[in-house]
Image (tube, rainbow, N blue to C red):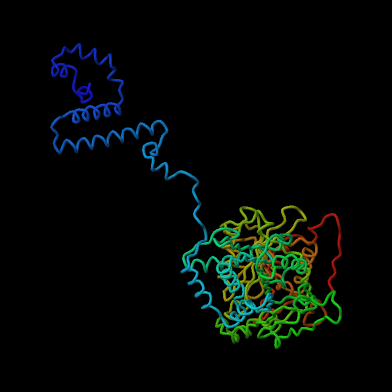
Amino acid sequence: MHLYFSGYRIARIAEMLGEKASTIHSWKRRDQWDDITPYDRVEFSIEARLCQLIAKESKEGKDYKEIDLLGRQLERAAKIRRYQNGGNETDLNPKLANRNAGERKAPEKNVFSDEQIEKLEQIFMGNMFEYQKNWYRAGAQNRIRDILKSRQIGATYYFAREAFMDALLTGRNQIFLSASKAQAHVFKQYIIEIAREVDVDLKGDPIVLPNGATLYFLGTNARTAQSYHGNLYLDEYFWIPKFQELRKVASGMAMHKKWRQTYFSTPSSLTHSAYPFWSGKLFNRGRAKADHVDIDISHAALRDGRLCEDGQWRQIVTVEDAVRGGCDLFDIAQLRLEYSPDEYQNLLMCDFVDDIASIFSLELMQSCLVDSWDVWEDFQPELYRPYGHRPVWIGYDPAKGTEGGDSAGCVVIAPPVMFGGAFRILERHQWRGMDFRAQAEAIKQLTERYNVEYIGIDSTGIGHGVFKSVQEFFPQVREFVYNPAVKNALVLKAWDVINSGRLEFDAGDRDVIQSFMSIRRSTTASGNRPTYEASRSEDASHADLAWAAMHALYNEPITGENTQHHNIVELY
């Protein structure tokens, strides 16, 4: 049989064995040699040769080597046979079975070594301006910090890092509460970035550290989430609607004495519900007159920070304070050129706005706020086509195109799916220092990401060049030539949409609110015709997003929002 497997013919085998060929043929038929698989033929040959070597009385070194080789080949053959029956290597190797026995532990996430934590402390403490060091000291000594601040001085950046270091070193939970979940995740991004500086990629939402600390990132839809507890960070609270209702829930999360509360914001309006909290008037409510406090909230009193009579540590940090505190990120002279005096005082010097003269009051604009990450399930901003193939409208308010000029405003609005439904501002941009070709190219890029049905552009001044350039790739673009009648129509349409509760945008988009609030009623130069205006000179551009939004909203007929009721709109 082994000779047959080796390839010898029957006649040759008969000759070698001294048997008749017919006898060999009968053996072949009886034992079914042809039905034996190649795998079995090899295994039989290995066994035969191995038995021959084992029976050999006088063995040489080469014999032992061959015995070892053949033994390993038999083991391999046995593995193959077990695999064919659905087995695995653990059937032959008990050590492998023991190695895989029991439940496997998932690898621990978000782990920092002592050396990494020490390096993070050095990074954190070594990258603070003087006013941020003041915040750090105040946090170590006071339970409640309340900070009124200029824009862009690094408050969110600092407090994200402060909270993360506190979580690493103390194991205390940290709660970040913002107007929207998208805004709250700005904290998360800053925390992820500092962790990467020591080669750790943080995972999870919330982020859970091995020492038990949990970092929560919440929007204002967490008003009823009273089960959270930890240090509280509430940012831009002067732009959150129904602040006092939210504060009751939020402060309850940090009620234990070991937790601290931090509130910080740019100022909005004197009529905002958070103003009594800042001024101390809220403290006086319900208390006997003898227990009332009178808190000096002037800049002179709070410039360096002060523990006030109601138990809050307050500070006002203007952009000029930040520069004096070592922040070299600003050019004050240039900022004074870019913003009108009123805007400079509000945005950068922490003055509150009196919105009584505004057509679009703060209270009215706050009715538009939503937490877009939770409410807009059909919008995915991280995708190349964030809104899929559904239609959008674009409104654009051009810039003057000079380096120190105003900015261009652009909004992408999703029109209502149903007649009379809500408009949604999906995306907004402000571009500065761009000529009309660059502005047109920016619009073209938006048309590649969205299914654009309509574009409306103010063709006044440089806008004419933008309009002509856009017309080349979007022939149906609508042109607005500004005059008092056009402005009145735009404002009336926008006011009707907003007053009807038909405009939505993310609660973190404070610049949209500020833009609408800056529009006031005025008269023409002759004084005999009413109109609406915001400062349009080079040192101001704060209404660009509002005008851009109005250009898009105007694509709906002014009476299109309601076919069953007829309203008369009058603005005073």
Residue at 62%, 68% in the rendered image = 429
Q: Nearer the viewer, residue 89 or 148?
A: 89
Q: Residue furthest front?
A: 57
Q: Quadrant of the N terminus?
A: top left
Residue at 60%, 78% in the rendered image = 136
Vertical relation: 492 (above or below) 525: above
Q: Does residue 489 appear in the picture of this structure?
A: no
Give the quadrant of residue 559: bottom right
Vertical relation: 150 (above or below) 246: below
Q: Quadrant of the C terminus?
A: bottom right
Left or right: residue 16 versus residue 481 is left
Q: Nearer the viewer, residue 78 or 92?
A: 92
Residue 484, x across and y down, in percent: 77, 74
Vertical relation: 417 (above or below) 49: below
Residue 388, x across and y down, in percent: 61, 53
Vertical relation: 224 (above or below) 48: below
